[in-house]
Amino acid sequence: MPRLTRLTPDTAVGASRDLLADLVSRHGQIGDMVSTMAHSPAVLGGYLQLSRAMGRARLDRRISERISIAVQALQGCGLCLDSHVNAARAMGVDEEEIERARAGTSADPAIAAIIALALQIYREPTSITDEQVVALREYGYSDRAIADVVGVVALNILTGAFNLLAGLTPESDSSV
């Protein structure tokens, strides 16, 4: 059961009303997370800006979805986890790799290494070593792609923590 109410352009105020009205006009509908985030124009605006920015990331989307699956498996947001699993499937990631991502790894050593970095960023960023970054470069990741991992993790922390606070679950979602 959601803990926070959904807002619409009619029930939101100020900047949130404007953000929601723009989203509805462009997309026709908005999901529970976005409409609930509208209680805080700062959170909603920040989410929208970070989400748009991460759309320009250099990291391959099939990899970023696996990172998201690994982070959400730890964080415990079922709504986010379902969303990222479905996105990974839509991109052709097979079920075995999805299950490996849930466990924080991959059969591909390069992808396993970048997932491991993401989980360290989530759990304990002070433990990241120079050798790890060198190894990621040796796997072919650019500095930009490596830096993008921080954005993927941050976006997942934001959405997952918000959904958990708001009590949003896969059963309560109408569309994120």
Image (cartoon, rainbow, N blue to C red):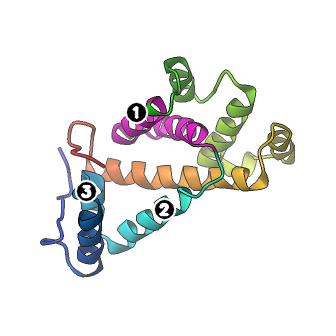
Specify whether residue 118 is painted magenta.
no
Image check: 71 left or right of 139? left
What is the x, y in percent for residue 104? 59, 30
Helix, strand or loop under label 1: helix
Q: Which residues are magenta?
A: 60-89
Magenta stretch mostly in which secondary structure?
helix
Helix, strand or loop under label 2: helix
Would residue 39 be seen by someone viewing this image from the given angle? Answer: no
Report the residue at 24% width, 60% height from top. 35
Q: Are marks 2 and 1 in contact (CB under 8 Å)?
A: no
- Mark 2, residue position: 52
Where does the N terminus fall, quadrant-wise? top left
Q: Is residue 32 above or below residue 77?
A: below
Neighbour tally class for label 1: few under 14, some 14-19, many 20 plus, Cα within 10 Å: some
Neighbour tally class for label 2: few under 14, some 14-19, many 20 plus, Cα within 10 Å: few
Q: Are marks 3 and 2 in contact (CB under 8 Å)?
A: no
Q: Quadrant of residue 172?
A: top left
Numbered badge on residue 53: none
Image check: 11 left or right of 176? left
CA gap between label 2 and label 1 equals: 20 Å
Instruction: In the displayed orientation, state which residue is furthest to the top.
Output: 96
Numbered badge on residue 30: 3
Q: Is residue 89 above or below residue 117?
A: above
